[in-house]
Amino acid sequence: MRLPEQRQLHARVRAAVRGAPDAAARAPGGGVKTVDRLDESGSLVERAVRRVRDHIRERDLKVGDTLPGEGQFATEMGVSRAVMREAFGALAALRLIDVANGRRARVGAIDGSVMGTSIDHAVATAQVSVAEVWDVRRTLELRTAELAARNRSDASAAMIRTAAQAMATAANIADVTRHDIVFHQAIARASGNALFLQIVRSFEPMMTIAVPVAWETRQTADARAIVLKRHEDIALAIADRDTAAAVTLMDAHFDQSIGAIL
């Protein structure tokens, strides 16, 4: 069975390299003059985006550290505040900086939702197939299950088990889906690799659609019980630090889930 047409669950990321018609450049003698063309290194907005990113790297800034305001960057670069506003907007859309009303911009935290938007768009526009996404996801989640069994803490093992149990007692498919997402993200978090967590998070938009579709293909209580039991078995293998069992069970889980939705 194929998934229905993908819904757009996130706003499209604004282009980080869009030109600005009111860009300005420093004129001889210190004045500011308006320019109407791109320089050889790209648009003024592109340059402004690179300048902010360079500032973060050069000063070894970390998540939550504050950045100079748009005005300071504009003065330093000899561009208009409108150019810097566009650059800040692009960086915020990509979650590279955090801009909130009433306070200065801060360095943003890694955010898998940006990748999720891109994947969702790619599927909706037929650039990649659901099968291709699920193949990538399967490869990643076999590894996260193995690492989670090896590296998990008592707290993370408990979180995985709790999510699996919550799936089993969920009252409706919306709750099953929500706890399933928590389950897989908890495994990725327990792996100890922050990048795995963010990549697994990027699959969340598709899971909100795929999990209910797969669930509907399991018409009997027994068929659904098998799915729920497999999640509990994966959680137990991770808690027992049984890497081989965790990988085998996750592989079997994907065999079953892929067959249900494709």
Image (cartoon, grey):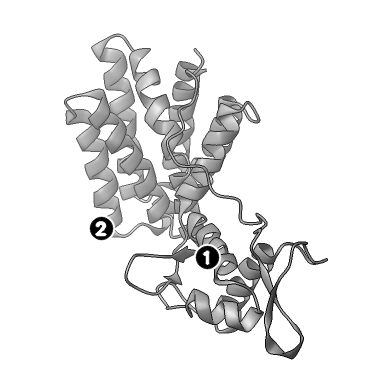
| Amino acid type, residue under disc 1 in the picture | Arg
Label of residue 189 in the image:
none
**Residue 81: % across, % down:** 55, 71
Towards the viewer: 26 or 3: 26
Q: Residue furthest right?
A: 40
Mark closest to the chain's N terminus, 1 or 2 = 1
> Which residue is at a point 49% across and 12% down the rendered structure image?
1
Check disc 1 and report the residue beneath it.
Answer: 85
Front tag of 1 and 2: 1
Residue occupying image coordinates x 52% and y 42%:
12
Packing grade of label 2 (10 A; few <14, some 14-19, many >=20) is few
Residue 64 visible in rendering = yes
Please name the residue shown 36% across and 65% down the image. 100
| Disc 2 residue type (three-letter) | Ala
Where residue 82 appears, x then y in whole percent? 56, 66
x and y percentages locating residue 258 in the rendered image? 49, 23
Residue behind mark 2 = 155
| Whether label 1 touches label 2, CB < 8 Å | no
Within 10 angstroms of label 1, few (less than 14), some, or many (20 or more) residues? some
**Residue located 34% across and 19% down the image:** 215
Spatial CA distance of label 1 from label 2 is 43 Å
Residue nearest the observer in this picture, 167 or 68: 68
On screen, residue 81 above or below 4: below
Task: Please tell me whether mark 1 sits on a helix, a strand or a loop.
Answer: helix
